[in-house]
Amino acid sequence: MAESLRFIPLSYNHADSHASALRLVLSINPHWEGPENRIEFVRFTDGITNTLLKIVNRKPGLTEEQIDNEAVLMRAYGNHTEIIIDRERETASHELLARKGLAPPLLARFQNGLLYRFIRGHVCTPDDLTRPSVWRAVARRLAQWHAALPIRDAPSSGSTKPVPPVVSPFQLVDSDKAAPPLGSAVDDITPIKVRQSGPNLWSTLQKWILALPASTEQQRARRQALQKEFERIVEEMDDGTGIGENGLVFAHCDLLSANVIILPQSSQSSKDRDVEEVHFIDYEYATPSPAAFDIANHFAEWAGYDCDFTRIPSRSVRREFLAEYVRSYIQHGGKGVSPENEQEVIDKLLHDVDRYRGIPGFYWGVWALIQATISQIDFDYASYAESRLGEYWAWRCEQDGSRAAAGKEMPLRERVWARDN
């Protein structure tokens, strides 16, 4: 990680929110201290893991745009989230993205969070994601991520001047280092080795399964069942055939509506006014992943926290999204795709995204089982876990034909996904 990022030896205290946040922001903006300043705190509640505060100085005479341009975002980590999120890697990911112009500048770290610049714009809702002007913008931006960002360090070339090496956020952690279990020892599970070394989607999922609670026989049995299912998923999915490097790209892996910001029209540079311009925020889960997983996960998030599956895109919308995505991927120099094989890549991605549609349910279901044990946030993680794992099992029943064989009705999510229009 870059040595230049400032570290503030203070913490955010949920029980003393105003005072502790004020101390943090004054550490980086001491000029905000004094009677002529009017510091305000705006709490965002869209996330279900962290505390996110927008801190502004409404000093008299400033316009709203000027106030927002100086605003600071403070993100304090949720209780025990280091079990599921590597904070060093997250910070390195943010720095890499900022250097590429794909994230707001980081201002400082503190003991349990980050301070960074605010992106002026409108936070998406799940309904926003269904608008063509927005999903086309998301497709373009996501393709830029996947095409332009490295998944590992590479030596610089073509320059006579010494260039600082690019810090890869994916080589900061020993890939064999498992997250600490919440319950008993993990000797009843043998972690599997995945095809790609280093942190990635599959190694992350393996760590999460090892971190599942295992204090009771029922918990241990469930963890073993999820491990067995995970091994089946990896065997089927981890084939290295997708776009990117060995089938992996730098993926966001948490592209829900609240992590998509629509820029104000006045600041948009796009000549295509029928398409918005968007930025992505929150990079806690960013890691090398098959592109098809990142896209399928985004489509799953069209349903929102309330799991309204009627919002999920139809096959024709998914194809249009992927056509937009592939054109942008080519524009940004993505590996393995050219105008000559563009249609072939779109067809394969459409197939692969369909193949991956059940995996986000497994991914977030395991995550929510951990959160149900560690989180202090007022959210029903246990019910959310069952809902998301239910998506996975419903997909499995469609894949193996067991739902149809039993004469059961197709679940709503699967019906909506199967629509052509």
Image: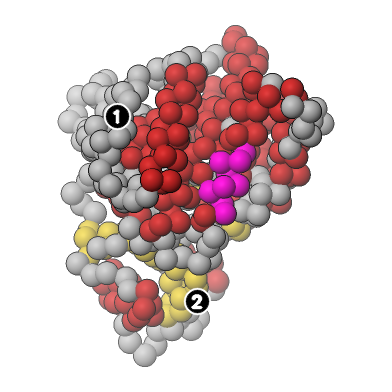
Q: Nearer the viewer, residue 198 or 275?
A: 198
- Report crowding for label 2: few under 14, some 14 to 19, many 20 or more residues within 10 A (C-alpha): few
Q: Which residue reaches farthest bottom? A: 35
- Residue occupying image coordinates x 28% and y 47%: 184
| Magenta region, residue range | 383-391
Q: Quadrant of the C terminus?
A: top right
The picture places residue 270, in percent across and down from the top left corner, at: 62, 41
In the displayed structure image, the side of residue 243 where residue 270 appears, left or right: right
| The label number, if any, that marks residue 276 in the structure image | none
| The label number, if any, that marks residue 190 in the structure image | 1
- Cα separation, mark 2 vs mark 1, equals 59 Å
Magenta part, dominant SS: helix
Is residue 361 visible to the viewer in this orientation of the structure?
A: yes
The amino acid sitting under disc 2 is Leu
Quarter of the image for residue 63 reads: bottom right
- Residue occupying image coordinates x 49% and y 71%: 43
Residue annotated with mark 2: 62
Numbered disc 1: secondary structure: loop
Q: Nearer the viewer, residue 195 or 136?
A: 195
In the displayed structure image, the side of residue 310 where residue 249 appears, left or right: left
Compared with 111, 55 (above or below) is below
Total marks placed: 2
Q: Nearer the viewer, mark 2 or mark 1?
A: 1
Q: Is residue 390 magenta?
A: yes
Numbered disc 2: secondary structure: loop
The picture places residue 360, in percent across and down from the top left corner, at: 54, 37
Is residue 260 visible to the viewer in this orientation of the structure?
A: no
Q: Is residue 194 magenta?
A: no
The picture places residue 349, in percent across and down from the top left corner, at: 60, 21
In the displayed structure image, the side of residue 176 where residue 420 appears, left or right: right
The amino acid sitting under disc 1 is Thr
